[in-house]
Amino acid sequence: MTAKTNRLIDEKSPYLLQHAHNPVEWYPWGEAAFAAARREEKPVFLSVGYSTCHWCHVMARESFEDAEIAALLNRWFISIKVDREERPDVDRLYMNAVQALTGSGGWPMSVFLTPEGTPFYGGTYFPPRAKFGRPGFAELLQSIHRAWQERRHEVTDTGDRLLDHLRQAAVAGTSGAAIAPEVPERGYRQLAADFDARYGGFGGAPKFPRPVLFDFLLRYWRRTGEPRAREMTLTTLRTMAGGGMYDHLGGGFHRYSVDEQWRVPHFEKMLYDQAQLAHAYLDGFQAGRDPFFGRLAREIFAYVLRDLTDPAGGFYSAEDADSSDPENPAEHREGAFYLWRAGEITRILGQEDGGLFALCYGIEPGGNALADPQDEFSGRNIPYRAKSDAAAASLSGKKPEEVAAVLERARQKLLAVRTARPRPHLDDKVIVAWNGLMIGALARGGAILAEETYTRAAIRAATFIREQLYDRKTRTLRRRWRQGEAAMAAQLDDYAFLIRGLLDLYRAVQEPGWLLWAEDLTRTQIALFRDEAGGFFDSAPDPLVPLRTKADHDGAEPSGNSVAALNFLDLAVLLDRREYRDLAAATMAAFGDILGRYPTAMAGMLAALEQQLAPARQVVIAGPPEAEETRALLRTVHESYQPGLAILLADHGPNQEMLAGNLEFMRNVATQEKPTAHLCENFTCQIPATEVEELRKMLTP
């Protein structure tokens, strides 16, 4: 550590490195920080965020780069910086504490702890001086210091009571309660009541995509035949893709929309959103049979493969919302990379093409971003689909296909210009959990859209994880890789999401090694995280983390328990293992209380419940893998929306041999004169089909 840097300079996290030159004497999370707090009898100031967080940047500029505030922190506190994406267990525990104290949460998260790690006060963003109805950070530090000096016993008692409350809440959250049969219907009705019929989505502004809702609704539609569940999903997928939350030039989705119309986004782009929404659009393509949904999935994949892929094969975490303003490079602004002035578009595209683009994408001379002339977006435009190709054709006198050609040419020209702008910060760490989601999406995309590029990318990423982040001796994962270094013990979501991705990859390519690795990781997951009271802890025991949490909400990311329940159900059918059926049931029952009270809080668990309620189904394709007839039958299966369907290839080779070790009926599946499909329900098979149309009819509900 030099005079110009602090201890964070030796870290790999992009977020921690952003703070390595602060005058604050930061510690990374670890025993050294807490030992210093105990030795010096100081409280700990814990600051948690991530590298693409807009308000984290604001608090850094205002407070952590301020010499006077840094002096207060250095004199009175031991300060710790945590990247929430590297340590979600730390983030989740102290976020629960902040929410218990204040009723809300977010990032940056600011928490004050005893030297033993017990939280006693917290909040999110604090301005340097009092404003926005928030106390000033400098004044807050002085108040905390006085309380620590004068009323330390009172402070520690407050922390002990808070931690005890969190401990009791964690125990109460594991219920083991029986799940009533009507719970999925109640979840559907909650969503139907909250559905925005005009703009899609659920509730009002701000609007988040929350892809787990789509997964549940489509599964519910498939099992019950309820048409509105499908309509709500497809409508929302369409309207989201038409809004400014979607990047119409470069592909991919921004984090969320600040308005109800999906028009004005919060501009950061997260890998986990791209992966989950790719899954959702692939589901929409299967369930809606509309090429539009397939095109959206392709555009998401194009963005990820172009801008979020490491040369070694893994996928990066995120791109920032902020970047240097092309009009004023000294200033960083949210969305600066993505905004356009109307005159700029006309100069690039010309009067005619620029006018048509402006008509279709809502470009206005005075800007369309926000009405407030004082707003930083004022005078600029966020492209969104204001007019369809058909509507623009009728207004312009062109044919729809001519409009489409002009718009495609215009998007490419604008993208080329935008690419030359100062790019937002790229968080280039590779997180196993989010890579698992993306591996699954690409594997499904390759199979559903018949695109080998996606399949190869999924295989390459899975191979990268296995070679760089998996210890074959201990059979354990590390969570994060960056610049050649694998670090941080993997958590429940790393195992569950990667297993999910490997199961999707196995379905797509029918290579037994991926299924065997998925089962091996499942055994490790059970050993590391299982709670005998029900479900799985989010992390393994850690002496520095005073309480192990168990997430009971499927939010921007699904909870590890919800994904694990689905994994167990899939493994039970693929391998005919009763232990996995029992684990799935026990995992769902562990959250029976919250499912009974507010089902959609765990929509991912509702999706698992839907799969449990549906009959176990398999389709066996018997034939040489390289034969075109075999491939045609497999394509037909993948094109159809069949959640929970086990796809088994009887290839008279390694895959069939592996499956036959668990599924007795696979031993006797013989290749006929032509490749053949056997559709089975509860291990009883229908009359086989050799033609694509026959199989398609069998798969149609």
Image (spheres, helix red, strand yellow):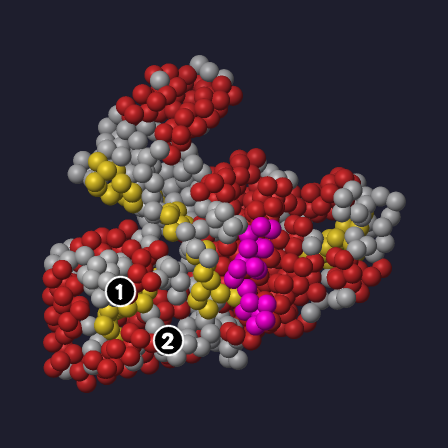
**Total numbered labels placed on residues in the image:** 2
Q: Is residue 371 left or right of residue 382?
A: left
**Numbered range of the magenta stretch:** 459-476
The residue lying at 24 percent from left, 69 percent from top is 79
Q: Quadrant of residue 348?
A: top left
Q: Secondary structure at mark 2?
A: loop
In the rendered image, residue 98, in percent from the top left (x then y), is placed at 28, 68
Residue 222 higher or lower than 307, as above or below: below
In the rendered image, residue 421, in percent from the top left (x then y), is placed at 32, 35
Q: Is residue 154 left or right of residue 192?
A: left
Q: What residue did someone put label 2 on?
A: 545
Q: Is residue 472 magenta?
A: yes
Q: Please state which of residues 663 and 39 is positioned toward the viewer in this rendering.
A: 39
- Residue 1 is labelled as 1
Residue 303 higher or lower than 104, as above or below: above
The amino acid on which the numbered mark 2 sits, given as a three-letter code, is: Val
Q: Please state which of residues 184 and 480 is positioned toward the viewer in this rendering.
A: 480
The residue lying at 14 percent from left, 82 percent from top is 151
In the rendered image, residue 194, in percent from the top left (x then y), is placed at 41, 52
Q: Please state which of residues 429 and 625 is positioned toward the viewer in this rendering.
A: 429
Among the two numbered marks 2 and 1 on one chain, the one whose residue lies closer to the N terminus:
1
